[in-house]
Amino acid sequence: MSLSKYQIFLRTVECGSFTKAAESMSFTQSGVSHAVQSLEDELGVCLLSRSRGGVTLTADGRVLLPQIQRLCTEHHRLVQAAADLKGMESGLVKVASFSSVSAQWLPLILKSFGELYPNIEFEMLTGDYYDQIESWIVSGEADCGFLRLPSLKGLSVYPLHQDQLKIIVPCGHPQADCNPFPVETIATEPFIRLEEGDDYEIRAALDEMGVHPHVRYTAREDRTILAMVSNGLGISLLPELMVHNSPYPIVICQPPRSFYRQIAIAVKDKKALSNSTRLFVDHVRRWVAENGNK
């Protein structure tokens, strides 16, 4: 039994648009739209109201949403239970993460894990580590997820890594060699800020330094900020994992003080994990302990 249409529908409701749902599931926007339309045709009701601003549930959609959620959750439990009966080395793990972990850690983690357990499959979800990933874990949409601490919803959490914040400046910046980077320069130069909602640790660090930067630009994606800094549009403050292996030429500088974001992996209930999820979480903890600072 395939529930992909139902799962895509739930993700679209969660994200509020076909485009954002497609990005989080690594699908095309047209593919997501077609899947939801196919589900509506199958059920004979209109589930979503479409507009330029995104999608919202219709009255029928609100009635059916809880049943669709239960259907997907129970199907996933069934698949996991069957995998557990067959042994620990098969099954499906749904992993939620945010962009820098997805880009820097996950490919290497999945490769090394796959060499040990080639029959375990994965579904990858990318979201906002402040609340979206936690919601996916709580609802059962994700089996585990990478997030920042502190966690807000009483999940079972395993701390992984302290990700240090770094000042980034364009190559040739007159103070690129300063260690630490001068506070007054942070306050006076054009500053490129990570979008509000994704910048909690950055704002806290600036407040602790007593700095009120001249914010010239705000961007959602860390790669966008790296490109802007590289082109001389300003300086920025980002977690090291975001700037590691930057595809753009930049200089990474040490702030006047050390500041961190704490990265963890979380599950809803460590006592109720499937065997495949438990194996993956344990592997992640070992891998980060050995490689997180490289």
Image (cartoon, rainbow, N blue to C red):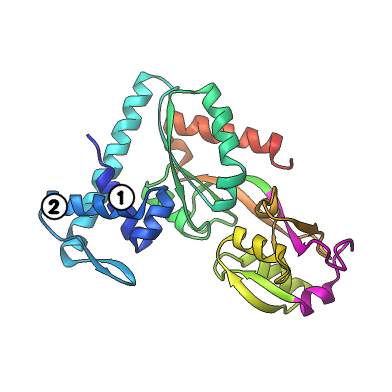
Please tell me in which quadrant of the rendered image residue 206 appears. Answer: bottom right
Q: Which residue is mark 1?
A: 31
Q: Secondary structure at mark 2?
A: helix
Rendered position, 292 above or below 227: above
Three-letter code for the amino acid on which mark 1 is drawn: Gly
Does the magenta-highlighted stretch encompass residue 2?
no
Magenta range is 162-189
Q: Which residue is mark 2?
A: 41
**Residue count near mark 2 (Cα–Cα under 10 Å), binned few <14, some 14–19, many ≥20:** few
Query: Which residue appears at 65% of the width and 61% of the height?
Result: 227
Horizontally, residue 23 falls left or right of residue 241, namely left
Query: Which residue appears at 82% of the width and 74% of the height?
Result: 185
> Where, quadrant-wise, is the N terminus in this rendering?
top left
Q: Give the number of the mark in front: 2 or 1.
A: 1
Rendered position, 185 above or below 111: below
Three-letter code for the amino acid on which mark 2 is drawn: Asp
Q: Looking at the picture, how far across and down is residue 274, in whole percent? A: 42, 32
Q: Secondary structure at mark 1?
A: helix
Q: Looking at the picture, how far across and down is residue 153, in whole percent? A: 48, 56
